Amino acid sequence: MIESGSDDNRFFGNDCTHGGDGIFIRVLNGWTSRRNYFEGNDTSYANNNGFEAWSPENTYVKNKANHCSYGFWLGASDKTRLVGNEAGYNGSPDGFHNAPESFGHGGIVFVNGPSSHTFLDGNWCHHNQGGGIVLRGDEATAGAAWKAYHWVIQRNKLESNRWGIYARHADWLTLGSNEFTDNREGDFFDAGNVTNVVLLQGKASASSEFRITHFDRWWHTDPSRHRGDIDHRPEAVRTALLSHKRVPFAPRPTVKTSAGVTPRYRWEFGDGRTSSDAEPTCSYDSPGIFRVGVTVDDGELAALDWSEVVVPDGVEETFNEATRWSVRDASGVSRVRIISDRHAPSSEALHAHIEPYDGGRVELVYSKMNRSLHALKELVFWLRVRNENIPAWQDANPIVTLKQDDEHVARYVPERDLLSQPLHNEGRDGWNRFVVPLAGGNGWEREGPELTKVTELALGFDSWGAPPLDIWLDILAFR
């Protein structure tokens, strides 16, 4: 088991058979483990799952996960690659068959968590009591909260399963050169709400190659996502970005394909717009975090890539004077400072490092204010957190408190814990944008009177404890 920021590890040829889970990437505090590589490991005969992971950006190559309850259980594992793995005899009535889902069991299963930008090539899924490959979006909201989104499924051998591929609440799937044999209830089963499926008609051999060799991602929220030094933002572009809230996004994918073949492109820009151009340009007129994806194919094989584009709010005030910030109710000395961070929305963020910290409600406080709220309707801020404790958060987070004087204090409490359950898929250990209506509503309950001005602002966090607690804050403003 690995967890809490255990990144960039390489696991080769290990015998992890007969476990509870064979290999488990656990995320109980929101701090994911990324870019781990697993090749040639055997996790068969696990009581539950051969592989279980709740983290994005991990790669599985030529592993075995047979005779388990599930071969690969990969909920909340966005940006995952599986190539050449075997998952067979999972969920068999005469073997392990714990925690059945509506589809039974399965070989490679992505359910109960997001699965955007997923690539499956050349896997062998056979004799599973359910789907050979299963992808399912959010059941509670019928896919409204999130779908299994932006997949390539190609050259997989799917035989003697209940279904070859079982899909539900899914969008933007590219299927190419899969081999189906003796799947009892169908090769590809649309279990409902599956849209935008592209079927490649060509028959690619196992040795054929088609891939994106480089993808120039300009605006990432996390430095670890860069492949080399590719964050080249001209100063003129940054100035326009901050003053006009427009981001010219011009990615440059480099594609390796056969001579004489013209690749086909499909882009989605996270706001409903699409493009079939090789090098599109896209501008955003509103702030937020936009999921960008591209699939490229040559009629037989496909490749995909992705990016998150962060569009900051264009505001004049950011409350980034470190001397006015303090930490209240912490059990030890805390450090609050302004740091330069090219991956923050404004490239400069407030960082509060709270250590030691024994848990409970703690507040990041901005004092000595005199801000009139006349004609203002909302408070906006960007936030990133890292909580090393397991379990992490308790109660509601973050809670916003505005003080006019001792008799006039208003608290804004989110309807759910927005740190345990971020506003978007990529927000677990990246930036999240919060908009708090001063009148309450839209997911926030106001407690206390309406205010005419603010003399103190506090952001409250409640954790089970264990130091340190790190909070990054950027672009805080009334509008």
Image: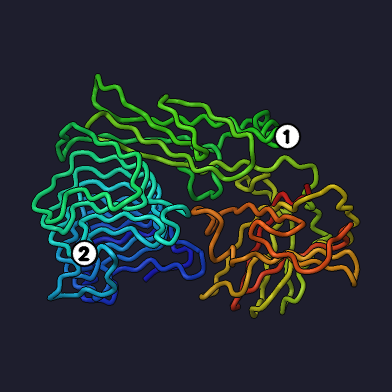
Residue 59 shows up from this direction: yes
Residue where numbered disc 2 is placed = 65
Mark sitting on residue 243? 1
Of the pair 172 and 227, the residue shown nearer to us:
172
Of the pair 10 and 316, the residue shown nearer to us:
316
Of the pair 125 and 136, the residue shown nearer to us:
136
Q: Quadrant of the N terminus?
A: bottom left
Q: Position of residue 61 (x, y in %)?
A: 25, 53
Q: Identify residue type, mark 2.
A: Ala
Query: Could you tell me how many numbered marks the image carries?
Result: 2
Query: Residue 297, relative to residue 226: is it above or below?
Result: above
Query: Of helix, strand and loop, which one carries label 1?
Result: helix
Q: Residue at x 40, y 63 (%)?
A: 54
Query: Residue 359, relative to residue 419: is it above or below?
Result: below
Query: Within 10 angstroms of label 2, few (less than 14), some, or many (20 or more) residues?
Result: many
Q: Identify residue type, mark 1.
A: Ser
* Residue 152 found in image quarter: top left
| Mark nearer the N terminus (2 vs 1) | 2
Query: Of helix, strand and loop, which one carries label 2?
Result: loop
Give the Cα distance between marks 2 and 1: 52 Å
Of the pair 351 and 400, the residue shown nearer to us:
400
Q: Left or right of 59: which side holds 439?
A: right
Residue 7 shows up from this direction: no
Q: Residue at x 31, y 54 (%)?
A: 135
Query: Residue 276, relative to residue 404: is it above or below?
Result: above
Q: Residue at x 68, y 28 (%)?
A: 236
Q: Residue at x 63, y 70 (%)?
A: 396
* Residue 39 found in image quarter: bottom left
Q: Left or right of 391: which side holds 58?
A: left
